[in-house]
Amino acid sequence: MIKKNISVFLLFFYSLVCLFFLSWQANQLVSGLRRTFFYLLKPVGEVPSKVLWHAGAFSGNLHQLMNLDSQYRNLQERWVRQRLDEKALYALRTENERLRALLSLPPRADTVGVMAVVWARDPQDWYRSILVRLGKKQGVAVGDPVVALQDGREVLVGRVVEDLGHTCKVLLISDSLSAVSARIQRTGEEGIVEGQNSSELMMNYLFADSDVRVGDDVVTAGLGGVFPEGILIGSVHQPSPESISVYRRAALKPAVRLHALHEVIILVRQPRGRILP
Amino acid sequence: MIWWFGLMTFTLVWVCQMLMVYFIPAGYPSINLPLIMVVYLGITGQVGLAQTLGFFWGLGSDAAGLSLFGTQGFFLSLLGYLVGLLSKKIDSEKTVSQVTMVIGATIFCGLGCWFFQKVFDQAEVLRPWSLGVVLFQGFFNVLLAPLVFRMSSFWVKMWIQFCGRRGFLD
């Protein structure tokens, strides 16, 4: 009975409340209650919806993340490849510059410059000899002078001492067995430039009253018929004091960078009446 | 404990209803879960609870929707009472009875809301009302009603086990 009465009471109460709301829709109290109800219940439905939305977006985000990871790996690979390409490009560019400079050398009457790539050095001593990829098959002969290009000018490297077919050995001017007749360009005084098995050369047999000075350029004298005249050997680095003996000496700094030789030019002698390509 | 049960049921049904609305595109008739729950509570003899929850669910629906504030609150609480009255005359365990009650309740509430809109809405241009929408909603409600009834039974049993005594709803 009580239960039934409660139901009737609740029906009466709720109906009354609802009818009040319906009758006074524009009333501030009713509209305020409506807004309050809305804001109270909004999060209850909104939060699960957002959770569901995020859960739904999770697989998409994961897929996107995996795609990004794959793209990142591809880009990294491309970046590494590009770095290698850049280095290769730089090497090619510098090589191209060197070769272009070689092409611009003035022609000689009795020799033809043939370019050769340095591919090995003396394993015992870098200042003694090098191996170049050019030999008898290409017309190279023992004794042919070898030069390089330094700042647009020919500089002496050494001479061919051994022919190995497609390869030949070049004795560097810094080797102690090397001796080149030379001349101080400024004064015209002559002497012999000998190797020291080091990064320095020594010009011997200068007269005691020689006017050799620091910075003087020393070139080949062309005597002996091995090296053509006028090829730069180096510059005077330290002349010996005057009147110490019959001859003066002068330490030279070689013009050629022996530690950075990539290509050289072998001055192949041109036989009389024969024109080399 | 009845208060906790009421509060939890209210929240759970409201969340489910919101999620259902979230999944159904706007403009389509959705399942009225609070209505089915009111019918369930009324049919199982929980008339007071059905009225109270129906009242608050209705007000929530009115506040969140476009219907006049109080319309659904009134009809859901009235529905709880009427179903409570009828519960003694029908076999509430039979699916046919449940389905009949749900479809009847949907049409009753739909027509009631339409009538209240005619009477209380002061707007010059009234929102169009379609019997088709009510019938569609009734159809969907009927489809879902047996499932909701089963889940509600499980929900009540769970609470009974949790409370350790049978008459916690009394």
Image (spheres, coloured by chain):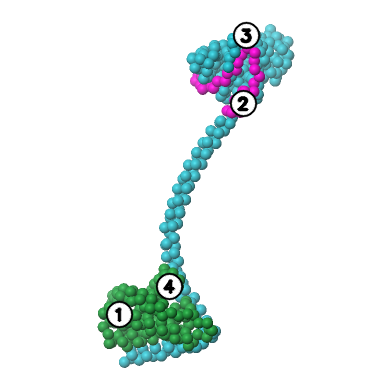
Chain colours: A cyan, B green
What crowding class fits label 1: few (fewer than 14 Cα within 10 Å), some (14-19), or many (20 or more)? many
The C terminus of chain A appears in which quarter of the rendering?
top right
Say whether mark 4 and mark 1 are on the same chain. yes
Is residue A116 part of the magenta span, yes or no? Answer: yes
Check residue A76 for magenta coloring. Answer: no
Q: Name the front one of labels 1 and 4.
A: 4
Distance in Å between CA atoms under marks 1 and 4: 24 Å
Displayed quadrant of residue A44: bottom left
Q: Chain of mark 2?
A: A
Q: Earlier in the sequence, mark 1 or mark 4?
A: 4
For the residue labelled by badge 2, is the local secondary structure a helix, a strand or a loop?
Answer: helix
Same chain letter for marks 1 and 2 = no
Real-space Cα distance between discs 4 and 2?
79 Å
Expressed as whole percent of the image width and height from the top left, the position of residue A137 reads 51, 15
Q: Amino acid at mark 2?
A: Arg
Labelled pair 4, 2 in contact (Cβ < 8 Å): no
Asked which secondary structure carries label 3, the reply is: helix
Residue type, numbered disc 3? Gly
Instruction: Tell which of A122 and A59 is nearer to you.
Output: A59
Residue A107 shows in this picture: yes
Residue visible at 39% across and 86% down? B78
Give the spatial CA distance, label 1 vs label 2: 98 Å
Where is mark 1, residue-wise? B98
What residue does disc 4 label?
B28
Q: Is A107 on the left-hand or right-hand side of B143? A: right
Residue A165 location, x and y as percent? 49, 15
